[in-house]
Image (spheres, rainbow, N blue to C red):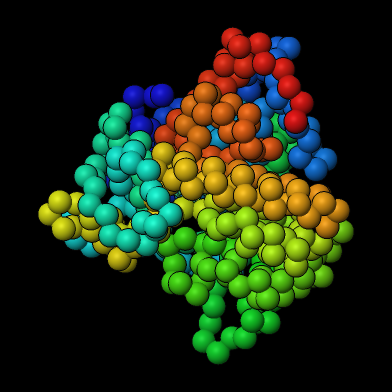
Amino acid sequence: MTNNLNKRYDVTKTFEYNKEHGPFEKVYDKNDEIKKILGDYWIETDFFWFKTNLPIWVAAWPLYNEKYMKAASKDGFEVITWKTFRTLHRLAHASSGKYMWHNIVFIPTKQIEEKSIWTKTIWSLEYKWKVENISITNSFGMPSDTIPEWINSIMSLEKYAKENNKQVITSVVWTPKENWTIYDLAQDYAFLARSAEFRWSKIIELNFSCPNVQWWEWSIYKDIENSLIIAKNTRKFLHNSDTKLLIKMWFSNRDYYKEFLENIASYIDGIVAINTIPMQIIDKDNKQALAWWIISWTCWRAILDLWVKAVYDLRNARDELLDIAKHVKIIGCGWVMDAEWFMRHIDAWAEFVMCATAALFNPELPLQIAKYLNKNKIKRKI
Ligand SMILES: Cc1cc2nc3c(=O)[nH]c(=O)nc-3n(C[C@H](O)[C@H](O)[C@H](O)COP(=O)(O)O)c2cc1C
């Protein structure tokens, strides 16, 4: 892992600063090197129309401009997700207090258990990464550009993505307004999805577990009836029948996932799981990790057990439903930092693996995985 973890994203600066000035290193293109290293070794998977030999991809992540998307593709990630977009402009949270202006803090590796989600935890907080601090907690508040702005960004990446054989996922989320019914909200999602599709996006992710925002915005996945209205309406509104629709889910159990899929599978093509985990994280002086709101959102090593369980349950739920849901792709997302862990995920449960934090703090991950596959002579078709 790289020693200077602030090269791609400087955690001591705001989201907006990073967006404007980052990445802070010259990113070199590792794609040819990766291909050469892979040679005869690979993990082959089909993602809809796309064949890949290295199923480590980037989940909806902190920065959504073209510079950061290109940097991730140069690192060797073949499928990359934009950060979630809204219909309107919104700045990232600006904290006040001890951890002023920052959106990310490193925390220790301790595992979060299901019973401690939402609870208060005392952890040591750092801006500097240390070996024992390999999780982060973040609070961004789902910033977004306006539709014309982000559509411009999407368009500016089109030529590059096509020439370099990269697939791009566009993640979208609603922005509730006073007195809106579920049908208005469903239309907000549909409008976003259609706008992205109109500008060449062929894979759209509906964020149903949006972190960092008010409770009614992030928990839509918990309501199957409303999730169904949104998925059905979005599907109806899309122009091309082969545009793929994914849903970003949160942690739950097999019975719930089964019921969810039973109702919604015919309108979607895949599920991405999981999103970050809400915790109230404070230091020993009782200072909150990120001061804007009482809760911040935790990921990387600390959520390993939870995401493993979620992805395992999702796969079982899908497989139990046989024909109703067999087309639904399960994309595991959370705690992948090195090649060994990537392999463990592939061996045990995931068809595709995404990472968010590693794409910022260990951008050499695809290269490391290629070396690992070659060294261990791994050749597999999933
Ligand atoms: C800084 C940061 C920003 C994120 N922004 C989004 C987002 O806009 N939309 C979303 O669905 N998930 C977002 N996520 C969640 C990730 O996509 C992912 O679900 C989660 O971080 C678990 O993966 P990881 O352990 O590899 O980070 C974000 C995560 C991080 C760390």
Q: How many marks?
A: 0
At a point 66% along the width and 32% down the height, the residue shown is 55
Determine which quarter of the picture holds residue 291: bottom left
Residue 344 in view in this figure: yes
Q: Is residue 238 left or right of residue 13?
A: right
At a point 30% along the width and 43% down the height, the residue shown is 107
Q: Residue 51: where, in percent of width, then height?
A: 78, 32
Determine which quarter of the picture holds residue 191: bottom right
Q: Residue 245: where, in percent of width, then height?
A: 74, 57
Q: Residue 161: where, in percent of width, then height?
A: 70, 38
Residue 18 in view in this figure: no
- Quadrant occupied by the N terminus: top left
Q: Nearer the viewer, residue 145 or 339?
A: 339
At a point 81% along the width and 62% down the height, the residue shown is 266
Q: Is residue 118 above or below residue 228?
A: above
Q: Is residue 311 above or below residue 340?
A: below
Residue at the far bottom: name it.
Answer: 179
Residue at the far left: name it.
Answer: 285
Q: Nearer the viewer, residue 364 or 289?
A: 289
- Quadrant occupied by the C terminus: top right
Determine which quarter of the picture holds residue 350: top right
Q: Nearer the viewer, residue 91 or 248?
A: 248
Q: Residue 308: where, in percent of width, then height?
A: 54, 42
At a point 76% along the width and 52% down the height, the residue shown is 320
Q: Is residue 176 left or right of residue 196?
A: left
